[in-house]
Amino acid sequence: MPRPEPDHQPITLRPAEPGDAVAVAEIWRDGWRDGHLGHVPDVLVAVRTPESFAVRAAQRVSDTTIAVVEGGVAGFVMVVEDEVEQLYVAAAHRGSGVAGALLACAERLGWEQGHERVWLAVATGNARARRFYERQGWVDEGAFGYPAEGPDGPIPVPCHRYVKPLAGA
């Protein structure tokens, strides 16, 4: 049976505000678990508690753009310099165009900051995310160990580095 078309609601993108941090943390934690469990070191899973996402979301408000659908936070993207550090969409909004809108925003931010290309890291085992980025024109430059923030220093995570050249994004 064919999959029904998602009901596309208007998406509004705006800079995050401190009051958005709770919703961002929840989306981040749920999405991180969906894409990373079984693909990252156990020591990283152990430190990615609900509290850790809440603290980091509150600290990263200035780097965050949120997508709002029907008055609620549907997803977010965090961009620092030329890196798209985080991009997550609430499960209820996956397949609705929110991820594509956030990724296009991240590319535009990279362009506006003067970068000729942007990059991101995807956990090697996160096949869904890898397919999404490839459909959006991103190119896999190969495997590397991404230094995820851990309690005692960086924790290398098996990832692939995806890049996209920017031409007037």
Image: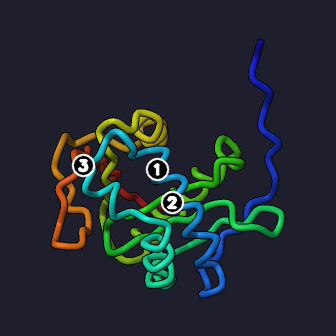
Any part of residue 154 in sight? yes
Is 91 in front, or is 98? 91
Cα–Cα span, label 1 and label 3: 13 Å
Q: Which residue is denoted by mark 3 in the rendering?
A: 41
Q: What residue type is labelled 2?
A: Arg
Q: Which residue lies furthest to the top in this view?
A: 1
Residue 146 is situated, as x and y percent measured from the top left of the image, at 21, 56
Look at the image and name its color scheme: rainbow
Q: Quadrant of residue 134?
A: top left
Element under label 3? loop
Distance between the alpha carbons at the discs numbered 2 and 1: 6 Å
* Viewer-nearest residue: 35 or 150: 150
132 over 89 or under it: above or below: above
Q: What residue type is labelled 3?
A: Pro
* Circles 2, 1 touching at the beta carbon (< 8 Å): yes
Q: Quadrant of the N terminus?
A: top right
Question: At 22% from the left edge and 45% from the top edge, which residue is drawn?
Answer: 158
What residue do we see at 29% from left, 39% from top?
A: 124
Residue 96, x across and y down, in percent: 70, 45
Which residue is under mark 1? Answer: 33
> Which residue is at the front of the view, 64 or 141?
64
Instruction: Please identify the quarter of the rendering in which residue 44 is found.
Output: bottom left
The residue where tag 2 is placed is 29
Q: What's the residue type where badge 1 is placed?
A: Arg
Q: Mark 2 falls on what kind of element?
A: helix
- Local packing at callout 1 (Cα closer than 10 Å; few below 14, some 14-19, many 20+) is some
